[in-house]
Amino acid sequence: MNTLNLDLEHCFGIKKLEHSFVFSQSNTQLIYASNGVMKTSFAETFIELSKGKTPTDRLFGKPTRCEVLVDGTGISKDFIHVVKSFESSINTSQSQTRLLVDQERKDEYDGIITDIAEQKRRLIVELNRTSGVKKDDLESTLLVDFGVKSIFEILREFVASKESGLEYEIKYTEVINKDVLEFLKKPNVQSNIEKYFDKYTALLENSKAFKKGVFNPTQADNVSAALKKENYFAAEHKIKLNGVEEEFNSQEELNQYLLKEREEILNDNELLAIEKSIKKVAVKTLQQIIEKYPIVPYLKDIPSLKKKIWYRYFNLERGKIQLLVDQYDQSEQRLSEIEDEAKSQTPAWQDVIDKFKQRFFVPFDVRIENKAESILGREVPNISFVFTDEESGAECTKKQNELEGAVLSQGERRAMYLMNVLFEIEARKSDSKNTLFIFDDVADSFDYKNKYAIVEYLRELTTEDGFHQIILTHNYDFYRTIFSRVLSGHAKYHCSFSAIKTSDGIDLVDFGGRKYNNPFEQWKSNLHEVANLVSSIPFVRNIIEFSEGDSHADFVMLTSLLHMKDNTPSIKVSEIKDVFDRHVSTQRIDELDQEALVLDLIQSQAKTYSQEDIPTEINLEHKIVLSIGIRLLAEEYMWSKVSDKRPISSNQTGKLLRRFKSDYPNDHGEQKSTLEKVNLITAENIHLNSFMFEPLIDLSINHLQELYKEVETNCPIAP
């Protein structure tokens, strides 16, 4: 992939985003996005695309536009894999299987059993035809009936036994079914079934109306019911039965005759009870079978009857079964050898586990319970997590779904999640599957050791052909780490971005220049520019604090340019130059007017920035200048209003605000509201640790511009 073009509109929380990622210099793109800008929505958009779905605007249902092109062609869902910061459950059985399976052994194993499987399939087709048992249920039915685990055990036993089976041709399903078995379990049926069918057979043999195997009492009842339904006798028709002299002129006469023919059964209460039980179609079918074949004695031992029926079917296919058993026996030894080899093998899956354990700490070991079956692709991996007591050495084994609640800490659960992520990535690597990974704050909430292990793994992915990654983070420290350790060369400056929210949508602006990742280096080389000089003040102040302490005169001097002190209005550029020269290497500061007052420069530059239409960028120096200017304006106003003029040595803005509110408890509400904003916003922007200027990056330049104007308007300084 060379380019990835995005045209998104109303995709989850993304109002609009158009961007083209170029992967020619690196397979990695890095995006810093503060919370609430677009990071989660970006990931969710690609999750939907990976499912073959279109993202939506879930809140307002606005029309969505989502065009994602890879080198000019619509992106494939299989090309996308999103890794979220954390998911409580993730199914990686497929990726684990791909890493476990030894394709060469699997192919040999599958090749050996392919012919056997085909012969078995053909045998099952024939048995289905003769037995009536569904093909999908036939093998499991055989295993239950014979009480074994393999159909080949059944077939081998049949070949060895020479068993001929039941001598009568009947369908298994007509005798062995739910209704028949329930009928045969009834106590009165068990004790009288032979007597009943003896009487029943005699009835058929001696009756003039009934004929064994042709026309039985059930069929006669059906005929009688049909005649009644069709008003046969109401039309004054008559019935003449073969061998019976009298004619029947009514329904009553016909039914009386049929009952008389069956009186031997009807007059015996036990036999009558059986007669009444024969209602369901399946039982009536059994009755018809018994008319033809004397199988009643077999009904007393159903397990034996099942086997005899199957053996009859097997005899019809004896030649096929003999060939199948012979081939299976010949192949069984090699199959066993392959399984033994699989058990002793170390698959790629183990490499993932080893890699994971080398880099991350978790209090468990990971094992495969069904290693051979998994390697041969016959079963899904059955993974266990083994905990070992440090004192006794005792082991406790848990399945993954059992590792909830108090068993693992949140950090350990995140590490387990990361292990599953590695399974998926390594499986795609093993398959040489081209993939675009979207990493959504994958290192969030990890400690530094694990965080840097993640960074190292992401760096390794940059060397994988066919792998591309977009790394999103809201953590500026993590961003800078990825920038320095994962990106290299020109890619640092062309493949790193910051997501900026504008009134129109989202802009991804370049975020890889030295002015963002090492701004002080850029500023101190160009101190003739007022913005660079002002922005450097909190940095140099921090350096002095670290090296000399906060009581050093130079630290106190620079503090007077971040807070309004008695000497703030009188500090000149020449004094700042002397301080800078003593602590850092500077350039071009002497090009400024050395007699110029620094406070005037700060406020002039801040006022200019508050009125400019500043382009959508990170604007770091703009934000620092505005933040310092806002605070100095606010503090100058408060000093002019408070009655308590005593100096404040620390946390000056907050303490000064409390004095102001104490002096004006019931008025100056608008001013207090503005000053509260100043105290809330500027404190994080221009104080320790200014080397970690994440709050400034996250803050909108427009917000600072509006606040500066608000302070000017609501907190004016009397001339």
Image (tube, rainbow, N blue to C red):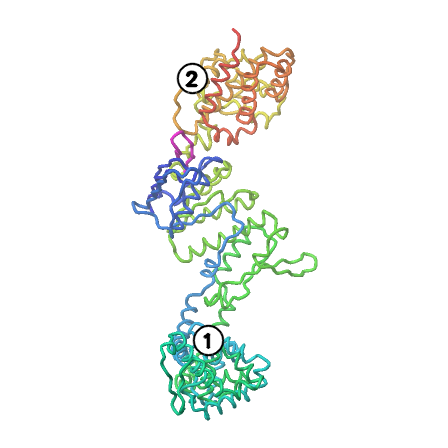
Dot 1 and dot 2 residues touching (CB under 8 Å): no
* Residue annotated with mark 1: 139
Image coordinates of residue 97 in percent, x first then y, are 47, 61
Question: Considering depth in this image, is 138 or 536 the residue closer to the camera?
Answer: 138
Asked if residue 622 is positioned above or below residue 88 in the image, the reply reads: above
Inspect the magenta stretch and tell me whether residue 65 lies in it: no
- Indicate whether 260 appears above or below 600: below
Label 2 is placed on what type of residue?
A: Thr
- Name the kind of residue labelled 1 in the image: Glu
* Residue placed under numbered mark 2 in the picture: 608
Name the residue nearer the viewer: 65 or 539. 65
Query: How packed is label 2: few (under 14 Cα within 10 Å), some, or many (20 or more)?
Result: few
* Disc nearest the viewer among 1 and 2: 1
Q: Residues within 10 Å of mark 1 (few under 14, many from 20)?
A: some
Residue at (46, 21) in percent of width and height: 706
Rendering coords of residue 46 (x, y %): 41, 45
Does residue 220 appear to the left or right of 301 in the view shown? Answer: left
Predominant SS of the magenta segment: strand
Residue 71 sits in which quadrant? Answer: top left
Q: Secondary structure at mark 1?
A: helix
Name the element at disc 2.
helix
Residue 357 seen in the current view? yes
Disc 1/disc 2 C-alpha distance (Å): 86 Å
Q: Name the N-terminal-most of marks 1 and 2.
A: 1
Using the rendered view, name the quadrant where residue 495 is placed: top left
Q: Which residues are magenta?
A: 496-508
**Residue 503: in magenta span:** yes
Could you tell me which residue is drawn at 50 percent across and 82 percent down?
306
Q: Position of residue 177 (x, y in %)?
A: 49, 77
